[in-house]
Image (cartoon, rainbow, N blue to C red):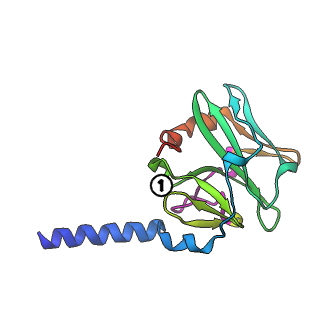
Amino acid sequence: MKKIIAAFMTTAILLTAFAGCGKEKAAETSTTAQTSENTTNEVTKITSGNALSIPTDELSENAEFYPVDVDGTEMEVIAVKDSTGTIRTAFNTCQICYDSGKGYYKQEGDKLVCQNCGNSFTMDQVGEISRGCDPWPILDENKTVTDEEIEISYDFLKDSADIFANWKKA
């Protein structure tokens, strides 16, 4: 019985370590927070055949939060320019904590901080390939980027709705 408990505890510790979900990173952030609650972007309803359109001239090194309603599911997209000026996009939900109800991000200083586990990420890390406890990426193949705008299709948003099933409900 002790071996089973030890194996279970070891597995749990390893999973947490690999996921990167720890409170220690929260201390790296400042106390000024930007959230979707104080953004000027209104909820955009996206219907079949349409797309979320984000003007690129609105983007800077401060994250912009774009609230979206897709067939009754509330979602949010983060768009930002990284330190090199590259446009990065992600869903405002954590790849590990999304189902907790608190697995969303607020900007604190120059980082995005998960409201569930406290992990923080620089703008240069937004939209990278899935790797753990970070913003759920919207990769190049899931969007169209021109000099004027970023478009994210209804179909992609609709297919991603399940990660928002418990979003901000805790």
Task: Read off the magenta span.
Answer: 125-142
Comparing 170 with 146, the one in front is 170
Q: Is residue 142 above or below residue 20?
A: above
Residue 128 falls inside the magenta stretch? yes
The quadrant of the rendering that contains the N terminus is: bottom left
Q: Position of residue 26 (x, y in %)?
A: 56, 69
Q: Secondary structure at mark 1?
A: loop
Farthest-out residue, left: 1
Q: Position of residue 145 (x, y in %)?
A: 80, 47
Chief secondary structure of the magenta span? loop
Comparing 51 with 5, the one in front is 5
Q: Residue at x 49, y 57 (%)?
A: 116
Residue 78 falls inside the magenta stretch? no
Q: Quadrant of residue 55?
A: top right
Q: How many numbered badges does the structure rendering display?
A: 1
Please name the amino acid that badge 1 sits on: Cys
Residue topped by disc 1: 97
Q: Is residue 101 above or below residue 60?
A: above
Q: Residue at x 66, y 36 (%)?
A: 68
Q: Position of residue 100 (x, y in %)?
A: 45, 50
Would residue 56 appear left or right of 49 to someone viewing this image?
right
Local crowd size for mark 1, using a 10 Å CA cut-off: few (<14), some (14–19), many (≥20): many
Q: Is residue 45 above or below residue 165?
A: above
Q: Residue at x 82, y 53 (%)?
A: 59
Q: Is residue 105 above or below residue 42?
A: below
Q: Position of residue 63 (x, y in %)?
A: 73, 56
